[in-house]
């Protein structure tokens, strides 16, 4: 039997000690970079405990996980305010991109609207021109049918300045036929005063009433033309004996006036105007007082 020495006891006690460092390997959490460098490069296999050498792979795994967590901590904001700031910046960037897209789309939309408006304007203008051109083919028809001298008197008198001269009073009516042949518009008719002249001397005048003529219709307009106490100043020698012998009087006269017709085809946007000047020659005779003078072939239309 051999006696146990102190060295044997020590070796036995050491061999029976539990390997607590293995438990410490899994207890280490997220070592710092400085410790990682000391463990990786500063330590040697001889200095380091055996359990660190044998359990290197768990430490390496812990190093990888800590490195990944460190990198994620750099990417993610470390506080709520920083996270909000990052979030707002991202939203602002997205809004600016959307605004740019909307601005680009809005510009294209405006161009399309301008193009559509221009196209509509051109088409509407062409349509109005077509209507205006078509209306010119429907010129109103005017015919001075007859004229009746109801009476006339020649008597001595004084003008406004007191000069003695012969004074003429005349009363007559003019009958005019008017026809609107248009199929798609009515016309509004006005005229200048109807005047009776003996050369340059005006003897009588009258105003036609304005009226509106529907499409494809006609009417007869009767206008009174009269003159009262018109001084002659000896300018009408044919009436020298009219005071005593009215039946023998025969005086050539001219009837003149202008007739204007306006057609509102498309409201006030498309208007068509027609104008006609009329001049008729008629002879005033005492024998035909109260009887119509046919002017169908005695008028000129311009």
Image (cartoon, helix red, strand yellow):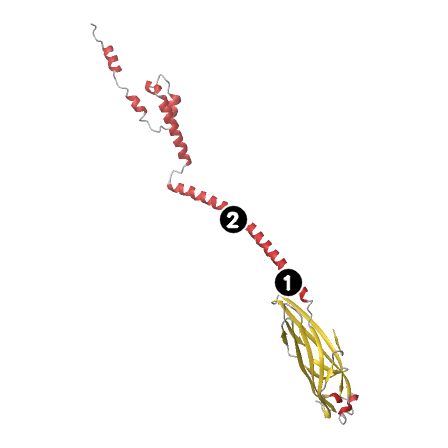
- Label 2: which secondary element: helix
The quadrant holding residue 148 is bottom right
Residue 50, visible in the rendered structure:
yes
Which residue shows up at 60% across the image and 57% down it?
120
Q: Secondary structure at mark 1?
A: helix
Estimate the x, y position of residue 65 in percent, counting from the top left: 38, 29
- Viewer-proximal residue among 125 and 29: 125
Where residue 285 is drawn, which disc sits there?
none
What's the mark number on residue 128?
1
**Horizontal arrangement in the rendering, residue 17 relative to residue 63 (left or right):** left
Q: Residue at x 79, y 88 (%)?
A: 238
Quarter of the image that includes the C terminus = bottom right
Q: Is residue 296 above or below residue 265?
A: below
Residue name at image x 41 percent, y 34 percent: 74
Compared across the picture, whether 151 is left or right of 89 comes to right
Q: Position of residue 127 (x, y in %)?
A: 64, 61
> Residue 125's x, y, as percent?
64, 60
Return the residue at label 2: 102
Q: Residue furthest top?
A: 1
Q: Nearer the viewer, mark 2 or mark 1?
A: 1
Direction from residue 272 to residue 61 in the image, left or right: left
In the rendered image, the residue lying farthest to the bottom is: 244
Instruction: Kindly report the distance in space between the C-alpha atoms of the residues bearing marks 2 and 1.
Output: 38 Å
Q: Earlier in the sequence, mark 2 or mark 1?
A: 2
Q: Count residues near mark 1 (Cα–Cα under 10 Å), then give few for <14, some for 14-19, many for 20+.
A: some
Can residue 207 be seen here? The reply is no
* Image quadrant where one finds the N terminus: top left
């Amino acid at each position: 039997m051999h006696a146990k020495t102190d060295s044997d006891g020590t070796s036995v006690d050491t061999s029976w000690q539990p390997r607590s460092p293995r438990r410490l390997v899994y207890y280490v959490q997220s070592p710092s970079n400085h410790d990682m460098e000391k463990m990786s490069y500063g330590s040697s296999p001889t200095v380091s405990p055996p359990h660190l050498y044998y359990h290197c792979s768990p430490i390496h795994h812990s190093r990888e996980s800590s490195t990944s967590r460190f990198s994620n901590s750099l990417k993610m904001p470390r506080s709520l305010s920083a996270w909000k700031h990052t979030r707002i910046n991202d939203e602002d960037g997205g809004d600016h991109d959307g605004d740019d897209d909307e601005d680009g789309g809005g510009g294209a939309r405006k161009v399309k609207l301008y193009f559509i408006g221009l196209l509509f304007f051109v088409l509407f203008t062409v349509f109005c021109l077509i209507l205006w051109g078509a209306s010119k083919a429907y010129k109103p028809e005017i015919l001075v049918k007859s004229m009746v001298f109801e009476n006339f008197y020649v008597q001595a008198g004084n003008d406004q300045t007191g000069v003695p001269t012969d004074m003429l009073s005349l009363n007559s009516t003019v009958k005019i036929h008017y026809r609107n042949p248009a199929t798609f518009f009515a016309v509004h008719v006005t005229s200048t005063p109807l005047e009776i002249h003996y050369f340059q001397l005006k003897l009588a005048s009258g105003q036609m009433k304005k009226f509106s003529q529907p499409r494809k219709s006609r009417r007869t307009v009767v206008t009174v033309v009269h003159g009262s106490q018109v001084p002659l100043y000896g300018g009408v020698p044919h009436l020298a004996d009219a005071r005593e012998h009215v039946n023998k009087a025969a005086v050539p006269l001219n009837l003149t006036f202008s007739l204007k017709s306006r057609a509102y085809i498309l409201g006030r946007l498309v208007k068509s105007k027609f104008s006609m000047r009329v001049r008729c020659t008629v002879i005033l005779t005492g024998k035909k007082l109260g009887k119509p003078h046919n002017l169908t072939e005695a008028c000129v239309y311009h």
